[in-house]
């Protein structure tokens, strides 16, 4: 709305969307979601020291939270207490959310694949949780199977997909589906709901391959540790985002099922799988029995949460309307450059543009869409700090105040995911490398326009004028304006990066224009100096070259106009004393005097 112009009219939403939104608002459970998030991170901080992890959570109407842990015997620490079940911790309803914050701030969200399964109707080990809402961490179990009637299973799967896509704690979850409800067999179009799309594969085998690509180097990087521990402790400054594979089909290839069982055995390694039908070796199976579904491993029976097809369509309509905005036009496109000379650029696949408006583009010029502005800023920062790209330096540069480890990890993950969505990185590699150290290197195939220009300028040494023009023109064509234009980044000016990039552009433009003047290529002179003046209006050397080009054409009026434009640039600069440079004043007199002598 802030971008709407005068006389813009707001389109009224359809009545169906209004009715759906009213229902959603009447069911607001944001406070409960916040409490559950705080409880998990608070417990994660405590469990991170013991290598324990959470399998499931139960939340009662009064705010009491019970966590089901991986094994009995883990002694709770305040504010948690023990329960009748030796493998569970209890957070009393009387414990205020504020009491959880201190320890919760020290941990990342350890259970991003937590989903609500349903309401507990019976419990064998902890009767006090009957009536509570059951949440399970899909990744902690590894493989979860739904063994029941097809119609009910379909609704549950549809609900799980929507829950993951709209989860307030699962923004960094990668989703891939196969034969999902409401799609045709072999459909590969992504399902978009909220901010997290779910990719679709034509087969379960392909879905597994895609999930492996989404995980990237995570299985190797974590070694024998669990992602719960790494997220809770903020190890490596990463979010360790998981991949969830969901299939609504039955009758899968036994070899693929065995591979899935093997890949998810023990859980907690980054991959979660949800399948329709029972599978031997699955970590958790929901079995339909009478009026409920039994989860034998947890010792509970539940009435599951499902999402009917009509309800999902209504939800999709509301979200589509809320996201319907008028796109801004792009004022500056990539300028097509002529064929380059023998000077070759370093190989690249993604280009970080900092000479003008900041963006990341593919070779075809398609921009990379980042969900967070800080993610784009991080990539820009990394592109300008190749020698020492450390996490602590990046955090100091991007934020004036200290931020939580989880906040920085989320920004790193968003940057990595956004670039991977735009262009798949090389096999077993990622555009921003995952490490358990302080280093956060950007992939060598991600270059900035400034790096391309710098390498070409350096390659011009010892070459003739035409070769210099051929070398610099393609790189100068990327210059769109002042470095980091239209941003409020604090670090470029403070670190002198903006000044260095400005000097780089003006130097390259000066060399290109000087060679053009030498070859009597006046068009190149004006084009190159124009590119340089985009970053620094009134640059003395560039103005001087333009004045000489006018004089070389015999255009004395052009010489005067150029000098007058230089004076206007000085007047517009608040930090200038508005006095023209003596060398330009002298040059003006010299060029105009030449014309007088020629006439005489």
Image (cartoon, helix red, strand yellow):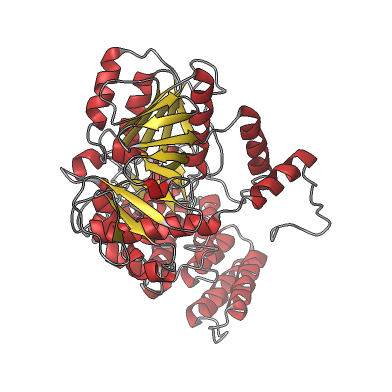
593 vs 330, nearest the viewer: 330
Residue 263 location, x and y as percent?
Answer: 24, 29
State the quadrant of the N terminus.
bottom right
Q: Is residue 71 visible?
A: yes
Image coordinates for residue 413, horizontal then vertical, percent: 37, 50
Q: Is residue 267 above or below residue 402?
A: above
Residue at the right extreme? 7
Q: Is residue 446 left or right of residue 19?
A: left
Coordinates of residue 447 in the picture (x, y in percent): 35, 48
Is residue 151 depicted above or below 269 in this figure? above
Rendering quarter of residue 567: bottom right
Q: Quadrant of the C terminus?
A: bottom right
Percent x, y of residue 416:
37, 47
- All told, the count of numbered labels is 0
Residue 160 to residue 79: above or below: above
Residue located at (54% from left, 79% from top): 585
Residue nearer the viewer, 212 or 259:
259
Instruction: Tell me if residue 472 can be seen.
Output: no
């Amino acid at each position: 709305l802030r971008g709407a112009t005068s006389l813009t009219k707001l389109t009224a939403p359809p009545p169906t969307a209004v009715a759906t939104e009213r229902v959603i608002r009447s069911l607001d459970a944001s406070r409960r979601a916040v409490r559950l998030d705080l409880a998990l991170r608070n417990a994660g901080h405590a469990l991170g020291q013991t290598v324990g992890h959470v399998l499931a959570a139960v939340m009662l109407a009064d705010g009491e939270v019970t966590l089901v842990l991986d094994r009995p015997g883990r002694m709770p620490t305040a504010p948690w207490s023990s329960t009748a079940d030796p493998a569970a911790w209890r957070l009393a309803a009387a414990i205020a959310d504020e009491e959880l914050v201190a320890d919760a701030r020290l941990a990342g969200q350890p259970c991003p694949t937590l989903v609500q399964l349903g309401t507990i109707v019976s419990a064998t080990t902890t009767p006090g949780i009957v009536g509570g809402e059951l949440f399970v961490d899909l990744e902690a179990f590894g493989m979860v199977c739904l063994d029941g009637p097809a119609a009910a299973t379909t609704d549950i799967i549809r609900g799980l997909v929507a829950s993951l896509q709209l989860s307030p704690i699962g923004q960094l979850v990668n989703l891939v589906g196969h034969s999902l409800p409401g799609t045709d067999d072999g459909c590969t179009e992504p399902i978009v709901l909220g901010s997290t799309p779910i990719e679709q594969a034509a087969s379960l085998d392909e879905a597994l391959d895609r999930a492996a690509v989404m995980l990237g180097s995570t299985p190797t990087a974590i070694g024998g540790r669990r992602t719960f521990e790494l997220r809770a402790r903020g190890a490596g400054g990463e979010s360790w985002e998981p991949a969830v594979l969901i299939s609504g089909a039955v009758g899968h290839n036994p070899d693929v099922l065995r591979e899935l069982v093997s890949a998810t055995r023990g859980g907690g390694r980054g991959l979660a799988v949800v399948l329709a039908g029972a599978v031997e070796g699955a970590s958790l199976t929901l079995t339909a029995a009478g009026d409920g579904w039994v989860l034998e491993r947890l010792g509970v029976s539940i009435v599951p949460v499902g999402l009917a097809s009509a309800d999902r369509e209504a939800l999709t309509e509301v979200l589509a309307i809320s996201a319907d905005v008028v796109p801004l036009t792009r004022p500056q496109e990539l300028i097509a450059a002529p064929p380059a000379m023998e000077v070759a650029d370093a190989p690249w696949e993604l280009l970080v543009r900092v000479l003008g408006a900041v963006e990341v583009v593919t070779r075809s010029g398609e921009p990379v869409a980042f969900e967070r502005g800080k993610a784009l800023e991080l990539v820009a920062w990394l592109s300008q700090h190749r020698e020492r790209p450390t996490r602590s330096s990046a955090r100091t540069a991007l934020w004036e105040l200290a931020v939580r480890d989880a906040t920085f990890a989320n920004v790193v993950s968003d940057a990595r995911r956004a670039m991977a969505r735009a262009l798949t990185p090389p096999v077993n590699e990622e555009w921003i490398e995952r490490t358990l150290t302080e280093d956060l290197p950007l992939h060598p195939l991600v270059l900035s326009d400034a790096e391309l220009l710098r390498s070409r300028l350096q390659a011009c040494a010892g070459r003739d004028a035409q070769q210099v023009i051929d070398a610099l023109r393609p790189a100068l064509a990327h210059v769109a304006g002042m470095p980091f234009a239209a941003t409020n980044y604090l670090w470029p000016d403070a670190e002198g990066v903006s000044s260095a990039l400005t000097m780089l552009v003006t130097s390259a433009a000066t060399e290109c224009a000087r060679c053009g003047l030498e070859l009597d290529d006046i068009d190149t002179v004006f084009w190159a100096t124009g590119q340089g003046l985009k970053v620094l209006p009134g640059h003395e050397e560039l103005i001087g070259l333009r004045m000489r080009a006018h004089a070389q054409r015999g255009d004395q009026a052009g010489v005067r106009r150029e000098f007058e434009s230089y004076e206007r640039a000085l007047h517009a600069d608040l930090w200038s004393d508005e006095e023209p440079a003596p060398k330009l004043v002298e040059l003006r007199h010299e060029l105009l005097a030449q014309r007088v002598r020629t006439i005489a």
